[in-house]
Amino acid sequence: MDDLQMLATTLAAPDMSREAVDRGRRRLQKRMRGPVARRRRIRMPVIALGATAAAAATAVVVVSSDSTAPTANPNSPPTKLSSRQILLAAAATAEARPAGSGTYWHVKTIDEAKKRTSKAYRSLGDSWTRRDGASWGRAGSGPVVKNDNGGGNWAPFQIAFTKLTFDQLQRLPITGDGLTAWINDSIRHSKTGRLPTGAEPTYVPHAMIELLYEYPAPPKVRAAAFRALAALPNVKSTGNVKGGRGLVINSGTADEETLVFDPATSLVRSVGTTSAASYHRVTVLAAEWTNTLPKVTPHKPLPPGRG
């Protein structure tokens, strides 16, 4: 029998005086209050700890009534994104970026190439293109000169062998499927150039990548290019690399297209083509609108008889 039971039994005795009963009742009430207070002091931290643990669990796992739902492991590594997820995220980022403004579309690159049978070369290039198609260029530390836009098949805005005005460039398809269909159709019906037989699978992603930096495509068209790349087969993520996120696109030929972009901005950092015989890489230092054109050096006329 414990103390509480003993007190209760004593209080129930018929020969107890009134004073003894009151004294015993006070002892019983004091004993009854005492353990409750102590238990309350013990339980309060336990309750707080339970609430904290529940809050922490809520932060990492969604409670489900499905008893077969997997249990989250807070020590497990982060989920690795697929190449498709990476490109679709880049599309959303590209679409949210402002279009920018300026007089000239300025592209500055480092061009590197090497063939198995020749030495590697490396060159720095700048180009400035106005909306009306007029353009200027500079190789290395040489002078800035105006390009001759009237000769040959070259044009400042030319995608998949199709010459475009600036306005036409702005109106390219804004869905991945639509842009892919446009590029394929442009290659098949080109009047300015032809691809070698079997080269289309490689050139299609190449044209998509060009829209990401080489030309002043609007945000929705750039987003469509990322989505078109996401729909291609055999695109592999190479993870975090110098400059951002790396991807390799194998179109079923001996050539592989490589793309590195900054996932925070969707801006391209480098592109390249690698084959068994050679590699060609372009590092993008700038691809943006500007109002500044460096001092232009006029073309010097050739001496008589040397034209």
Image (spheres, rainbow, N blue to C red):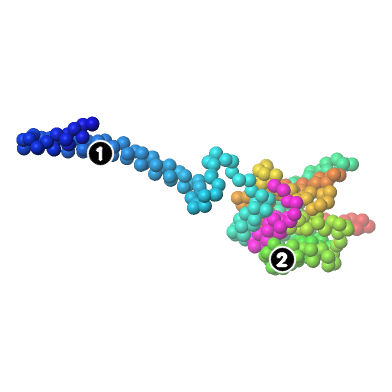
What is the spatial separation of the Cα atoms under label 2 and label 1, in whole angstroms?
74 Å
Task: Kindly identify the residue that appears in the image at 39 percent across and 44 percent down.
Answer: 51
In this picture, is 93 found above or below 163?
Answer: above
> Which residue corresponds to mark 1?
36
Q: Residue 193, image x and y in percent?
A: 85, 62
Question: Where does the magenta region start and end?
Answer: 209-237
Q: Nearer the viewer, mark 2 or mark 1?
A: 1
Which quadrant does the N terminus fall into?
top left
Q: Position of residue 168 (x, y in %)?
A: 72, 68
Find disc 2 in the rendering and name its residue.
178
Residue type at mark 2: give it. Gly
Label 2: which secondary element:
helix
Residue furthest front as drawn:
14
The amino acid marked with disc number 1 is Val
Q: Nearer the viewer, residue 87 or 130?
A: 87
Judge whether residue 299 can be spotted in this image. no
Residue 234 lies within the magenta run:
yes
Q: Is residue 52 left or right of residue 251?
A: left
Q: Residue at x 85, y 40 (%)?
A: 119
Q: Residue 41: within the magenta?
A: no
The mark nearer the N terminus, 2 or 1, is 1
| SS under mark 1 | helix
Residue 237, placed above or below residue 9: below
Q: Residue at image x 72%, y 48%? A: 236
Rendering coords of residue 188 (x, y %): 83, 65
In terms of depth relative to the viewer, which is nearer, 70 or 58? 70
